C-alpha cells in the first residue's frame, strides 16, 4: 500500500517542496512542531530507516545537511534538531526541526496549525537560503 509520502513523491498530493533529487525529497511538515519543520524522505518506500541500504542511509544525511543549515539561517532557533520516529507514516523519514532546547523535539506536544499562505512564505524563505 502506498504511503502518503509516496503519493507526495509521485505528485498526487501537493507539498511545499524544499529540495529534491533522484533519491530524496524534502518538504515542509503541514502539522509541524515548530516553524520550518521539514521532512526528508527517501523516494523508495521503506518502513524503517535502518532498513534502507547503507548507501541511502548515509546519503540521507548529506542531502539533509544544506536544508538544516538553511533552517538555522532563517528560523528563530539555536540549531536544527534531527529526529527519526517513524510511527505515524510507514515510510522512513527524518524530521529536521528548528529548536531552542532539547524539549522542542517533543513530538507529543500540540502541533502548530499554519495557513497555506504561512507555509508558502516559510517555503520561500528557506529556499532563498539554500
Image (cartoon, rainbow, N blue to C red):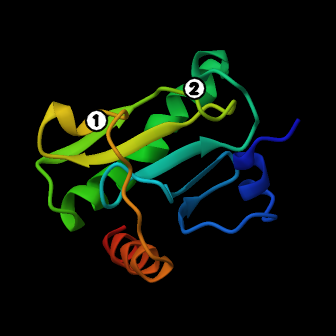
Instruction: Kindly identify which residue carries mark 2.
Output: 87
Q: Where residue 29 is drawn, which disc sits there?
A: none
Left or right position of 114 against 73: right
Residue 98 drawn above or below residue 50: below
Of residue 115 and residue 121, the one placed in the foreground of this image is 115
**Residue at the image point whose x is 51% and y is 28% from the top:** 58
Cβ atoms at labels 2 and 1 below 8 Å apart: no
Find the distance from the CA under tag 2 to the CA under tag 1.
15 Å
Where disc 1 sits, the SS reads: helix
Q: How many marks are shown on the rendered structure?
A: 2
Left or right position of 47 against 16: right
The disc, 2 or 1, on the residue closer to the chain's N-terminal end is 2
Percent from the top left, x then y, of residue 109? 32, 39
Q: Quadrant of residue 87?
A: top right
The C terminus is located in which quarter?
A: bottom left
The N terminus is located in which quarter?
A: top right
Instruction: Kindly identify which residue carries mark 1.
Output: 105
Circle 1 crowding by C-alpha within 10 Å: few under 14, some 14–19, many from 20: some
**Residue at the image point whose x is 39% and y is 81% from the top:** 121
Judged from this view, the residue extending furthest toward the front is 110
**Residue at the image point whose x is 84% and y is 41% from the top:** 2
Q: Quadrant of residue 64?
A: top left
Of residue 2 and residue 52, the one placed in the foreground of this image is 2
Left or right position of 32 against 23: left
Residue 27 drawn above or below residue 125: above
Percent from the top left, x then y, of residue 112? 36, 57
**Residue at the image point whose x is 15% and y is 54% from the top:** 77
Residue 83 drawn above or below residue 31: above
Circle 2 crowding by C-alpha within 10 Å: few under 14, some 14–19, many from 20: few
Percent from the top left, x then y, of residue 73? 20, 63
Where disc 2 sits, the SS reads: loop
Amino acid at each position: 500500500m502506498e504511503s502518503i509520502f509516496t503519493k507526495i513523491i509521485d505528485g498526487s498530493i501537493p507539498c511545499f517542496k524544499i529540495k529534491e533529487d533522484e533519491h530524496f525529497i524534502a518538504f515542509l511538515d503541514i502539522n509541524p512542531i515548530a516553524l520550518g519543520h521539514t521532512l526528508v524522505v527517501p523516494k523508495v518506500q521503506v518502513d524503517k530507516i535502518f532498513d534502507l541500504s547503507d548507501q541511502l542511509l548515509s546519503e540521507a544525511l548529506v542531502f539533509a545537511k544544506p536544508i538544516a543549515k538553511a533552517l538555522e539561517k532563517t528560523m528563530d532557533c539555536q540549531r536544527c534538531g534531527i529526529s527519526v520516529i517513524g510511527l505515524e507514516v510507514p515510510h522512513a523519514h527524518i524530521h529536521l526541526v528548528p529548536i531552542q532546547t532539547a524539549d522542542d523535539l517533543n513530538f507529543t506536544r500540540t502541533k502548530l496549525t499554519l495557513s497555506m499562505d504561512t507555509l508558502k512564505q516559510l517555503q520561500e524563505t528557506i529556499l532563498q537560503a539554500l
